[in-house]
Image (cartoon, rainbow, N blue to C red):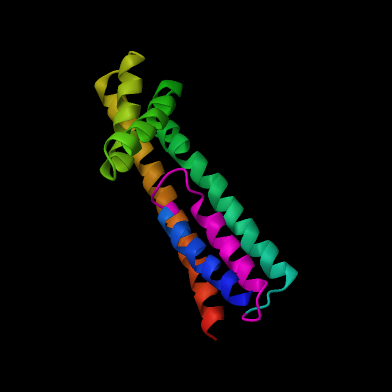
Amino acid sequence: MDIVLVILGILLTLVGIAGCIIPGLPGTPLNFVAVLLLHWTRFAQYSTQQLVLYGGIALAIYVIDAYLPIWGTKKYGGSKSGVWGSIIGLLLGMFFFPPFGIIIGPFLGAVVGELLAGKDQKTALRSGWGAFVGFITGTGLKLAGSGWLTWIFFRDLIT
């Protein structure tokens, strides 16, 4: 059974890292589940405090990542139209122009949303830049969290 849990953990680790880049996949929480699976094997034992800490960090990253593009759009002067535009742009970009649409979509969506709301071009571009900064920041945060949990998984699997 240990081997099955380790193989499943490795798969979740890989999918978790992919989830840092692909919207819709909960990257960091999947990496936490991989560590949890490893805990249920003979290869690693974590204290309750460690598991709560790892799970809390994974959950916090997941929640913060969902908010960062909205925060970035608002921080750079965007309105609700820019926020909704960035969300719609992300979804459309993800499906119609992968993989670059995932990066460019929130920017273009925020700009279009602001322009449709009657904002001037400068405000719309600032809002788009904020959406882009929020998206990139969230991706970096997810990669850091998932990388850390992946390191824990393989460090404890090997040692």
Please identify the quarter of the rendering in which residue 87 is found: top left
**In the rendered view, would you say 29 is above or below 125?**
below
For this rendering, which residue is in front, 10 or 46? 10
Give the residue displayed 36% in from the left and 15% down from the top: 117
**In the rendered view, would you say 98 is above or below 152?**
above
Examine the structure image and report whether residue 29 is included in the region drawn in magenta. yes
Which residues are drawn in magenta? 19-43
Which part of the image, by quadrant, shows the N terminus?
bottom right
Q: Is residue 135 left or right of residue 28?
A: left
Give the residue displayed 54% in from the left and 52% down from the top: 61
Examine the structure image and report whether residue 135 is included in the region drawn in magenta. no
Q: Residue lying farthest top?
A: 118
- Residue 106 rendering spot, x and y as whole percentages: 35, 35
For this rendering, which residue is in front, 19 or 140? 19
**In the rendered view, would you say 111 is above or below 68?**
above
Please identify the quarter of the rendering in which residue 45 is found: bottom right
- Residue 44 rendering spot, x and y as whole percentages: 63, 79
Which part of the image, by quadrant, shows the C terminus?
bottom right
